[in-house]
Amino acid sequence: MAMMARMRSLAPWFILLVGGLFVLFMVISDSRVLEFLGQRSQNVGSIDGEEISYQEFSDLVERARQNQERSTGQTIDETQMDFFRDQVWDALITQKLLQKKIKEYGIIVTDDEVREALLGPNPPEELKRQFTDSAGVFNRQLYEQAMRDPRNKQIVLFYEDMVREQLQQQKLQNYLFASVVVGDEEVKEHFIRQNIKMRADYVLVSISAIPDNDIKVSDSELERYYEKHKEDYKIEPSRKLKYVLFRRIPSKSDSLGIKSNLEAIVAKIKNDTASFKSYVQIYSDQPYKRDTISITALPVQVRDILLKSNKGDVVGPINTYEGYTVYKLIDKVKSKSEVVRASHILVRSTGNDKADLEKANQIYNELIRGANFATVAKLKSEDPGSASNGGDLGWFSKGQMVKEFEDACFKGKIGEIQKPVKTTYGYHIIKVTGKLNEDFVIEKITNRIQLSASTLDKLYQDAADFAYVAKENDFESEAKMMKYDVIETPSFTEDAIAIPGLGVNKALVKWAFENNLGDVSDVFKVPAGYVVVKISDVTKAGFRKFEEVKNLIKTKVIEEKKFEKALSIAKQIRAKLGDNGDKKLALSVWDKARVDSTTEFTSTGFIPALGQEYAFSNYALKGEINKWSQPVKGRMGVYLINVRYRTKFDPSTFEMQKLAIRRELTQNKRNYLLNLWLEEIKKQAKIVDNRYLFYR
């Protein structure tokens, strides 16, 4: 029985490891048992004509979630479930299409092949590891005994199915990768590009140094360029949407519900002998910890309350950025550094220091005569961030403010209004309102303010009600009547991953391209909430008109002409330099030339101080040593290059690295081929995704 338990314990772990390239392949295939449950009544979509029931998909999501949480030890938050479902859906599409291809290619795995994989000399590592002792010795006898034990029949059958599918995948990969070959020359070329190092002198005639005004362009030249490069201005079909977004944010009642619950807990704590820690462990969204914390690290809403509290006090619930929080003040202890609280009125620097100081002194004198600091700050301070708070900057420690301001605050007396202090921002009239050299030792219960099910239902119903009336009447007028904001997206194409402003929703993109101008949608779920959209613009495939792109074309033509001029200048410089002339001679031909030398680089393309310059590095790899090149067109302009140093090819090092390089290049080619192949079969497949009707 212990052996059976061990075998069973392997199942979820094995599934996780097998995924690899074809994520969740085995988990998904196991979901076929659902077909025996009867006629499917609800479908979340279809994949090349094969219907996918809600039950099948939701069961698959749940088992994938359990596997994920088992492997990572972390719970998937509800806010992440939409993204997780998308991953499972994509994996399901891949698996179903792969199954079709396996049948199409006639890929078969025999029972003998499965037995050989399980009982042959090399059992799956995932199973083998379970029968390996701490010294790394595999107990073959115990393994075979477990595999042949009749009590383990169902588990063994399960693993046979898993291994069969593994072997099918492997055969499919072998079929696809049969054409992937890496030649000796490719390996050698890769080694050279990674290992051969060079240095060079160069002269750069940069196109950015040629003024636009020096280049004359006629309309006829622009039109010729447009006709020659018309494909560059091709328009893909696109859509714009007007939408009303119903944001998924907690309601006032959600907030009050959390607060009321915590108020009841606080009342219980105050009449209970149990430790505060025990309440944290039961009721807090965050794990228990005891913190010693500076007042500057506390939420603003809590600072004054804890300052006035005594050791042992329980305060709250207080609404902070973490949610509603209840604090227990364990102690106040001496801090390593002092903090201060100050208010200020800023007279911002205008460049006229005398006038700025005069204005600051006028405000200072007004305060000295008894004017209320907070009132004057609201009216006259030019720091909008603090003016609305009566000049209050809150608590801060050393190093948070500019030095002159910091010195005035830490040296100033509490309650004293200081004469104007000058900083780079202008003149400050400062009033220190507090000093503290204590930290707080606290424990806390925190409850995040979360959307309740009832709020979520109401939000969805509001969106559904709006969708109904917007379809019956007018989208914009109904939104205006109901005081909803109408926003319009920028244009997006059919292959868009996300809709600008709304985020990722493939189903909504698909809907936008399957419907017509003015059509109003049902409710769709997007990351921020629920949305109802109207197709506000439909652009068909075609080409942008010449007048629309004229300025863009002009920029391109000017650039081309600059390269022509740079080439002409470079030829003149080359004539001046000859084969071995001093690079500084270039300046006598064109004083804007950049004359410099590189540090060491390889031919992978990146050159220090120049960036990605493949033409430069390719020439440096093959050009003559100590001889000026003919002009070489690069990304930034036209180069003359004199290679001063290049390491030699090392046959012995190459022999040592050759196998690893071939393996790397082969894997890269296989990955590239596989991605292209998967993209293509998905593009050709007919996918219907109606999940948005089921999940909200």
Image (cartoon, helix red, strand yellow):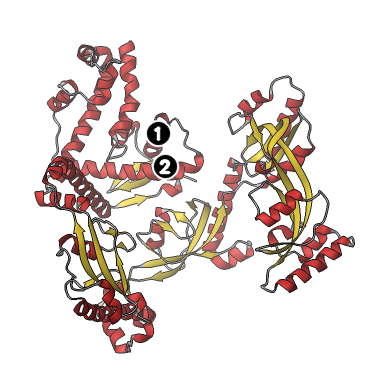
In front of the other: 199 or 128: 199
Residue at position x 55%, y 57% in the image: 245
In contact (CB < 8 Å): disc 2 and disc 1: yes
Q: How many marks?
A: 2
Q: Quadrant of residue 580?
A: bottom left
Q: Dot 2 surroundings within 10 Å: few (below 14), some, or many (20 or more)?
A: some
Q: CA distance from mark 2 to mark 1?
A: 10 Å
Residue drawn at x 39%, y 41% is 41
Please tell me whether residue 508 is drawn above or below residue 550 in the rendered image: above
Under tag 1, what secondary structure? helix
Q: Secondary structure at mark 2?
A: helix
- Relative to 317, is 683 above or below? below
Amino acid of disc 1: Gln
Image location (x, y in percent) of residue 499? 44, 59
Q: Measured from the top left, where is residue 69 in percent x and y?
A: 43, 32
693 vs 332, nearest the viewer: 332
For disc 1, the neighbor class at 10 Å (few under 14, some 14 to 19, many from 20) is some
Q: Is residue 229 left or right of residue 331?
A: left
Q: Which mark is residue 68?
A: 1
The quadrant of the picture occupied by the N terminus is: top left
Front in this rendered view, residue 67 or 310 = 310
Residue at the outermost front position: 582
Residue located at (42% from left, 42% from top)? 84
The kind of residue on which mark 2 rests is Phe
Q: Is residue 26 left or right of residue 388?
A: left
Residue 374: which quarter of the image?
Answer: bottom right
Find residue 155 and report its horizontal and vertical position in percent: 28, 20
N-term-proximal mark, 2 vs 1:
1
Identify the residue under disc 2: 84
